[in-house]
Image: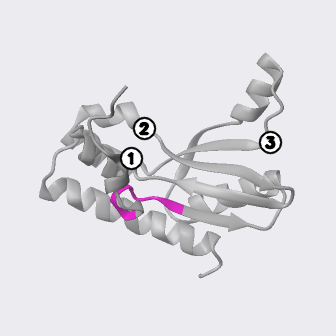
């Protein structure tokens, strides 16, 4: 299968890619990320552990891996005003996985930026404002996660 676009043309900033490394145990990191998200304008809509599900259902031996589905309702409402298709990417996810015992990686990409790149969202001033608003919140989360309050 050939991709229609070359993903290597995108810089991490193009997709809003953010990472943080936390020196703590997995469940402690998950709780910490939840607190930081809440302090910076994101509620937690859904949370689950794919590793627990897969380990239980099909007997894999995956290391701890957790997904936090975050949302800022005011921004989500603005996004839906621009395109109902954005719901297919809701919620914004923060992923926490164990890189090694006592070290967790937190990962996020901007669904708002990705939606625009894929043509799901409009390339207009209103969408740019949404990207900027979510970007400020995400930047605040990752500044805190990376210890740069």
| Image quadrant where residue 77 sits | top left
| Image quadrant where residue 55 sits | top right
Q: Earlier in the sequence, mark 2 or mark 1?
A: 2
Q: Which residue is mark 3?
A: 63
Left or right placement of residue 74 versus residue 119 in this view: right
Instruction: State the count of labels.
Output: 3
Disc 2 to disc 1: CB gap under 8 Å: yes
Q: Is residue 102 above or below residue 64?
A: below
Give the label on residue 139, or none.
Answer: none
Left or right placement of residue 73 versus residue 129 in this view: right
Q: Residue furthest top?
A: 57
Local packing at callout 1 (Cα closer than 10 Å; few below 14, some 14-19, many 20+) is many
Residue 38: x %, y % from top left? 58, 59
Residue 67: x %, y % from top left? 63, 42
Give the label on residue 111, or none.
Answer: 1
Quarter placement of the N terminus: top left
Q: Which residues are magenta?
A: 13-18
Q: Is residue 16 magenta?
A: yes
Q: Is residue 97 magenta?
A: no
Q: Is residue 8 above or below residue 48?
A: below
Picture residue at 78% right of the left edge, 31% below the top = 52
Disc number lying in front (2 or 3): 3
Q: Earlier in the sequence, mark 2 or mark 3?
A: 3
Label 2's element?
Answer: loop
Q: Is residue 67 above or below residue 27?
A: above
Picture residue at 55% right of the left edge, 68% below the top = 142
Using the numbered discs, state the Cα–Cα distance from disc 3 to disc 1 in whole angstroms: 26 Å
Using the numbered discs, state the Cα–Cα distance from disc 2 to disc 1 in whole angstroms: 8 Å
């Amino acid at each position: 299968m050939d991709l229609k676009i070359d993903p290597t043309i995108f810089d991490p900033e193009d997709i809003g890619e953010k990472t943080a490394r936390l020196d703590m145990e997995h469940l402690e990191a998950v709780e910490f990320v939840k607190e930081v998200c809440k302090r910076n304008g994101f509620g937690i809509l859904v949370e689950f552990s794919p590793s627990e599900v897969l380990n239980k259902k099909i007997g894999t031996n995956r290391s701890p891996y957790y997904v936090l589905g975050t949302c800022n309702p005011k921004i989500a409402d603005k996004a839906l005003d621009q395109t109902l298709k954005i719901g297919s990417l809701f919620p914004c996810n923060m992923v926490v996985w164990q890189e090694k015992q006592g070290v967790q990686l937190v990962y996020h990409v901007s669904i708002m930026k990705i939606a625009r790149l894929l043509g799901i969202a409009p390339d207009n001033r209103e969408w740019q404002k949404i990207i900027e608003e979510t970007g400020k919140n995400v930047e605040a989360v990752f500044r805190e996660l990376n210890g740069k309050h």
